[in-house]
Image (cartoon, rainbow, N blue to C red):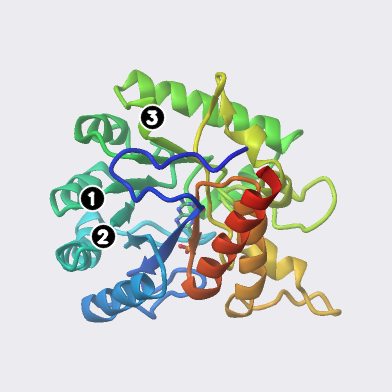
Amino acid sequence: MSVPPSPPGLPAADRTLVMGVVNVTPDSFSDGGRWFGTDAAVRHGLELVAQGADIVDVGGESTRPGAQRIAVEEELRRVLPVITELVAAGVVVSVDTMRAAVAEAALDAGVSLVNDVSGGLADPYMPRLVAKASVPYVVVHWRGHSHDMNSRAVYADVVREVHDELATRIEAVIAEGVDPSLIVLDPGLGFSKVPDAYGPDAHNWRLMSRLAEVARIGGRDFPVLVAASRKRHLGRLLASPDGTPRPFGECDDATVAVTALAAAAGAWCVRVHEVPANADAVRVAAAWRAARES
Ligand code: PMM
């Protein structure tokens, strides 16, 4: 899998892009509360860009396992001022939302990309809105809302099933008018996936190690976004001898390792909380690929 060109409207790069995360939430699983408040969130977004982020992903609703939904008005109140200020500062911004109303307001405020962790399933109006706006659309593999997603993490063959379910979503959003060249795929690491490191239920590891298979749909290789940063499967892999998972904030080195491997495998973009080392890793991977292919 070669690193595909960016969909129109996004930074073009001869390497995997880096998307920095700004969660304007009190309860996201790894950074909840840290950037909760417009000024802190904007400052953090600008800092991520200065550290090498190509895109800043702004979200107002936590999707950690077990999370309950918030009201649409609250989500808008959290993200809109942050998006507006970052866009005014010249930042390429994506909005992380499952709601068409939030995506629409964010598009009016100037976001370049809609990142929908439900792949258009949570809000039936989302695909049509994205089609009308003609912006890149991240379609994530998703089986249901966070409050009960763990019970849906049952697969006979996770790679085939995630591929097939994404193929169904792609077909559905294209039928709603979304331009296939604007679609980015995401295997939805941690969303209805068991965090085991080894064995038959190592869902996230199987998906990360077989990105090209997940992304080849209908004879087309879609760009892939990998969002492994600080997720539970890393903490589980790095558990202490008594089985206690490594805390999220101590999984950034493991995230960088995933970035290097995913970028070397041709991922289009990585979504990360800590930018500097990941920005280095995508450059290492680009040189690695160039040397191998020359
Ligand atoms: N995961 C989270 C939030 N947004 N977006 C995409 N495209 N893919 C993901 O896997 C994803 C996402 C949840 O993680 P966070 O709380 O660290 O943001």
Q: Are circles 3 and 2 on residues that touch, CB within 8 Å?
A: no
The residue that appears at 19% across and 58% down in the rendered structure is 73
- For marks 1 and 2, the one nearer the N-term is 2
For disc 1, the neighbor class at 10 Å (few under 14, some 14 to 19, many from 20) is: many
The mark nearer the N terminus, 3 or 2, is: 2
Q: CA distance from mark 3 to mark 2?
A: 29 Å
Residue depth check, mark 3 versus mark 2: number of the one nearer the observer: 3
Q: Is residue 92 left or right of residue 67?
A: left
Q: Residue at x 37, y 56 (%)?
A: 69
Circles 1 and 2, Cβ within 8 Å, touching? The answer is: yes
Badge 2 element: helix
- Badge 2 density bin: few <14, some 14–19, many ≥20, Cα 10 Å: many
Which residue appears at 23% of the width and 50% of the height? 102
Mark 3 and mark 1 lie on one chain; the one further toward the N terminus is 1
Q: Which mark is residue 181?
A: 3
What percent of the width, then of the height, locates residue 232? 64, 64
* Residue appearing at x 76%, y 57% in the figure: 196
Q: Is residue 5 left or right of residue 158?
A: left
Find residue 102 and name its label: 1
Residue 86 lies in quadrant:
bottom left
Q: Amino acid at mark 2?
A: Glu
Question: In x, y percent, where is residue 157?
Answer: 75, 34
Q: In the rendered view, tell whether residue 197 sits above or below residue 101.
A: below
The one nearer the camera, 196 or 139, is: 139
In this figure, which residue is indicated by the disc labeled 2?
Answer: 75
Q: Identity of the amino acid at label 3?
A: Ser
Report helix, strand or loop for mark 1. Answer: helix
